[in-house]
Image (tube, coloured by chain):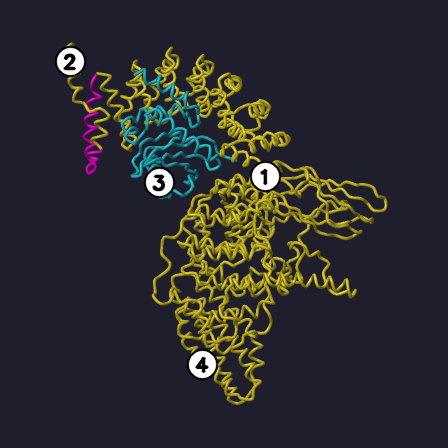
Amino acid sequence: MSGTFVIRFILIQNRAGKTRLAKWYMQFDDDEKQKLIEEVHAVVTVRDAKHTNFVEFRNFKIIYRRYAGLYFCICVDVTDNNLAYLEGIHNFVEVLNEYFHNVCELDLVFNFYKVYTVVDEMFLAGEIRETSQTKVLKQLLMLQSLE
Amino acid sequence: MALKIVKGSIDRMFDKNLQDLVRGIRNHKEDEAKYISTCIDEIKQELKQDNIAVKANAVCKLTYLQMLGYDVSWAAFNIVEVMSSSKFTYKRIGYLAASQCFHENTDVIMLTTNQIRKDLSSPNQYDTGVALTGLSCFVTPDLARDLANDIMTLMSHTKPYIRKKAVLIMYKVFLKYPESLRPAFPRLKEKLEDPDPGVQSAAVNVICELARRNPKNYLSLAPLFFKLMTSSTNNWVLIKIIKLFGALTPLEPRLGKKLIEPLTNLIHSTSAMSLLYECVNTVIAGQYSCSVGSVCLRISVVKYLGLLAMSKILKTHPKSVQSHKDLILQCLDDKDESIRLRALDLLYGMVSKKNLMEIVKKLMIHVDKAEGTTYRDELLTKIIDICSQSNYQYITNFEWYISILVELTRLEGTRHGHLIASQMLDVAIRVKAIRAFAVAQMATLLDNAHLLTGNMQRNGICEVLYAAAWICGEFSEHLENPVQTLEAMLRPKVATLPGHIQAVYVQNAAKLFATILKNQEGNTDSTAAQETSQLMIDRLPLFVQSANLEVQERASCILQLVKYIQKLQQKDVEVAEEVSALFAGELNPVAPKAQKKVPVPEGLDLDAWINEPPSESESEDEQPKAIFTKEEPKHSRPRHTEVDEKELARRREARKQEQANNPFYIKASPSSQKVYQETPGVEHIPVVQIDLSVPLKVPGLPMSDQYVKLEEERRQKERAEKKKKEKKKRKEKRSGRGKKHDSGPESEEDITPAHVVDIVTEEMPENALPSDDDDKDPNDPHKVCDIQGNLQDGSQVVVSVIFENKSDSFLKSMEFNVLDSLNSKLQRPEGSGPHDGLTVPFQLPPGVSNEARFVFTVQSIVMPQKLKGTLTFIVKDSSTHEKLDFKLHFTCTSYLITTPCYSDAFAKLLESGDLKSSSVRLEGVNMPFHHLLARICFHHHFSVVERIDSCASMYSRSIQGHHVCLLVKTSGQTVSIDAKCDEPTLLGNVLDEIKQTFSQC
């Protein structure tokens, strides 16, 4: 029962391996980050749609879910609860969808800083922070109005 | 001034904004790097301007580039500038950039302390929020120390939005600056009862993390969490709380009982799979015996996790999993390899006498269908593991097993030829009744060896021929047509096999020859015998020419022998008797420990030179002090690299156990090399054709399926017979041998083996010493013997205790009990409490001693331990309860297992650099060096890797796989031991124990 139950990183990648979001909750140096991104891409994209959404990765595991051409990946400790993070990803995507009104990959590209804001509203310091979609969306609209 | 502003805004019109950058990158797919380097140049220009809007835009673009993997650390200072902008939009960009780009070593972070403090105390909650979010990413120990107080204050902010963030960030602060925990904790605890559920959940998260590191300190919060658990409806919070309880229950067993009810309620009520999974996981880990069975079904919806959970349940409640056999077998059809592998793991634990054949049959079908050698190899090893586990406990029909093995040899490109071979040998040697059948099968295999040879060189399957040749030779009296087999073994094609297999061929050809002679000499016609000799003489020269020394030596030896025999035959001398005497006597399997148990006869010094070593070795005689560094001495003799099969199997078992315990173990990557080579026309010859070409009367290459059917019929017949017998008994009142079993539903015990499979147990030498006794207080009526660390699972230790009754009265009802420590626990049967004693399964008449075994689970083996225990018993005549206290001393040595290690492996181990070193000096040791080594070997379970004069390297391995390496040197009465081990604590303790051993003498 070792290890901590915090998220190590969150990644959004497209099928070609382009990063659409990378949020790190652990210290990695820049080269290591790129290596991780490439490895995750290699591990996740080869998997069939019928495969499980969990894959062992280094000493961690990746919990991922594919939406259209985008892979949403969360890296956690191997002993952590897979399903909770899977639901977490879906919750996140639903918020994005609501926030960008039918989100598509281009929304994420052109508004990448907003995506980071959404992540920060929902996850903090590697913990799931807020799960209520209405609350998150309310905050996001408030923040937007400040611009 | 005005002009400057106008100029600035005109410039801005030409600036790229983020959108332009993104589009630009998309339009320059071919020369992306070049395009980006021009962009970075532009950004550098923009950063030089005074206009904060331009700077913010530039930083925003940099953040995007950073995400794509470009280095932007040079802009750190500009990021700080943007962070300190008073406008929220820019501030946010600045903080985002900082959280993405800064890390502990970024030096400008020092400059941000005051800015962040200002933002934290800003009246605008969003400024505060954005600062907190940023801080969570780049907090350093310095920042944590300086800002801890500010964040603590924010935990009581009026806005829940801020409170929540502050609580979560406190965890990061604790990590970086642990001193802050004590003052902040009371407030953190308050937050568990915050009116806002979001803040509550944040506090739960943080405390859960803290408790995970040090559960003991958080036991007092258990009631609070218990309340939350029953009241909260937030699944995420519930999951965390359940995790927290998972960490707390080992410390406070009473919690477990309290938890059963709410957990069971959740299991039955929740619709969230994640929560259900968490509950089940905790239930299993805590081994609460609640209605796990009902859960299995629900869990199975999510296959992978279900399988994982089941493998845990299997350990405690095997029955409830076994009923889901079909479901698990279905999982083998799954497309996802990880699911299939999990399912395989489960099957291993599920087999019984009843379902073994069925399961293996299914697996065989999968072997045929399987794509990819890795998975197929995995299947193959699993089939063998399943069948051979617990000393072939589940196999009722060994003919079936042999035919399974033979079928497996037809797999293309498997790497596990030697595994199959060792199984064949093992079964043929140990199951006497099967030998005739096995020999027939092996003869067919040898006869059809050319079918395997197509891709023989590349894969390990030819190892099977090693076993086949040996079995045919050793048990040649069972052969139907020995001449034909002999012929097959001496085919020219054999010369293409690997050397060690050829050697076995040659040797066993000689055994066969002896058998044939014996058969033929009985006949009146002596020409047949002479023909056989001629055959040998014709074919053997091929092997005499072999490049392999072993083959050459054996072949020429045997060739000369046969030539001599031929001469005698020509003079009509009967030789068969004498020739077969060469190979007389039966080989029995020997227990791996047998050698150790043979006492060295007095006066025999195994380590002394028989002849003085040749003098030239003196030239390289210098002390090989470099043995622990890279310069490994050159005297590593070539050794026979075949580690004995038992040892391999044991290691494999240990490793597998380890992997089984770690469901997330990433399997070793398969060799990318394609093992199987296309040779048209050889590999796809159907089985039926082989049958036709086999003139032997044995049932060709049998299909194992037929055995399943046969077995089924046999069992049915058996049952019918039993019934008949019972009837007979009733009618004729004849007392037959009929069994009194009720022939209702077939139970495990009802299945009797097909033929008397007398599994020959491993032999121990007759003069084996009993387990080494420990001299204890002679006044004790009982002696508690020292511990023999027997490897079972990863950290299970079997302790054999010898009870000796030194009193004059009869002792009975003995109960053995040990006070468990956190680290070591006595394994008690299911259902008994943690403090119950175990009944010793015998009584002791005066003067008698007997041995009982107890299993302990040990968590950490790096420290020696003393467990207190009591033995209660009743003295028969006085019928009083008596008690005897004792201590069980688990030395670190007892966790070491004598493991042979070859010098090259040893050198590699030392070179790897993973080992920590330590050393010890022993003074005044007055004994010959070889005695000293023997003593270390014997008392501390080491084996000598290599010895050169007064210097020796030794090796041992712990049950948890730590390597321990020693370099022992002696000069005069001083012995120095340099040691290396991957676990320094363990090493220190082992050295201490060695020191103690020598201080006693």
Mark 3 belongs to chain:
A
Type of the residue with mark 1: Val
Tell me the amino acid under the disc marked 2: Val
Q: Is residue B780 left or right of residue B336?
A: right
SS of the residue at dot 2? helix
Say which element carries label 1: helix
User: What whole-number distance in Å separates the C-alpha atoms at marks 1 and 4?
Assistant: 70 Å
Q: Residues in magenta?
A: B26-50
Q: Say if A72 sits above or below B444 in the image.
A: above
Image quarter hosting the N terminus of chain B = top left
Prevailing secondary structure class for the magenta stretch in the rendered image: helix
The span from disc 4 to disc 3 (Cα, nearest Å) is 62 Å
Chain identifier matching the cyan colour in the rendered picture: A
To which residue does mark 1 refer? Answer: B292
Residue identified by numbered label 3: A39
Q: Amino acid at mark 3?
A: Glu
Front disc: 2 or 4? 2
- Distance from the alpha carbon under mark 1 to that under mark 2: 75 Å
Residue B739 seen from this side: yes
Q: Are marks 1 and 2 on the same chain?
A: yes
- Find residue B537 and name its label: 4
Q: CA distance from mark 2 to mark 4?
A: 109 Å
Q: From the viewer's perspective, is the residue at label 1 or at label 2 nearer?
A: 1
For chain B, give the colour: yellow
Mark linked to residue B6: 2
| Mark closer to the observer (1, 4) | 1
The answer to whether marks 1 and 3 sit on the same chain is no
Q: Amino acid at mark 4?
A: Ile
